[in-house]
């Protein structure tokens, strides 16, 4: 399955790259949320429920974002 997906999508997209970055920084809970610049791209990920923003403006993965990040990391790991 991994090979089939990589055949059609040889590289990660920007969403997957950002979600994996947050996963690697352990920004998976409100307590682990990190500061980052809120761009239109980040706002779109918040709207699509991949990311969540705290009242103080920190960002962390939602359950959906966490699942996508874990899956992408498995698929694109060498």
Image (spheres, rainbow, N blue to C red):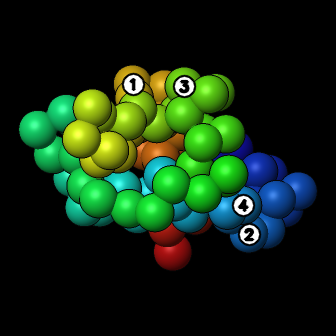
Disc 2, disc 4: CB below 8 Å? yes
**Left or right for 63, reference 42:** left
Give the residue displayed 11% in from the left and 38% down from the top.
Answer: 31
Whichever of labels 2 and 1 marks the residue nearer the N terminus, that label is 2
Residue holding disc 4: 13
Q: Circle 3 sits in a helix, a strand or a loop, which is it?
A: loop
Residue that label 2 marks: 11
C-alpha span from label 1 to label 4: 19 Å
Q: Residues within 10 Å of mark 3 (few under 14, many from 20)?
A: some
Rendering quarter of residue 59: top left
Q: CA distance from mark 4 to mark 3?
A: 17 Å
Q: Position of residue 22 (x, y in %)?
A: 36, 56
Please give the label number shown on residue 49.
3
Q: Mark 4 falls on what kind of element?
A: loop
Relative height, residue 64 to residue 74 (above, below):
above
Where disc 1 sits, the SS reads helix
- Local packing at callout 2 (Cα closer than 10 Å; few below 14, some 14-19, many 20+) is few
Q: CA distance from mark 2 to mark 1?
A: 23 Å
Looking at the image, tell me whether mark 1 or mark 3 is earlier in sequence order: 3
Residue 76 in the image, given as x and y percentages of width and height: 58, 64
Give the residue drawn at x 24%, y 41%: 56
Q: Is residue 11 above or below residue 59?
A: below
Assess whether mark 3 and mark 4 are in contact (beta carbons under 8 angstroms): no
Q: Nearer the viewer, mark 1 or mark 3?
A: 3
In front of the other: 52 or 70: 52
Label number found at residue 63:
1
Of mark 3 and mark 2, the one earlier in the sequence is: 2
Residue that lies at the very extreme toward the right in this rendered image: 8
Q: Earlier in the sequence, mark 4 or mark 3?
A: 4
- The residue shown at (49%, 26%) is 64
Give the CA separation, mark 2 to mark 4: 6 Å
Q: Is residue 3 something one can see in this rendering?
A: no
């Amino acid at each position: 399955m991994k090979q089939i997906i990589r055949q059609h999508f040889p590289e990660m997209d920007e969403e997957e790259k950002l979600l994996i970055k947050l996963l690697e920084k352990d920004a998976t809970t409100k307590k682990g949320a990190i500061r980052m610049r809120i761009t239109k791209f980040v706002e779109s990920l918040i709207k699509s429920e991949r990311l969540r923003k705290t009242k103080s403006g920190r960002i962390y993965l939602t359950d959906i974002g966490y699942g996508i990040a874990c899956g992408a990391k498995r698929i694109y790991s060498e």
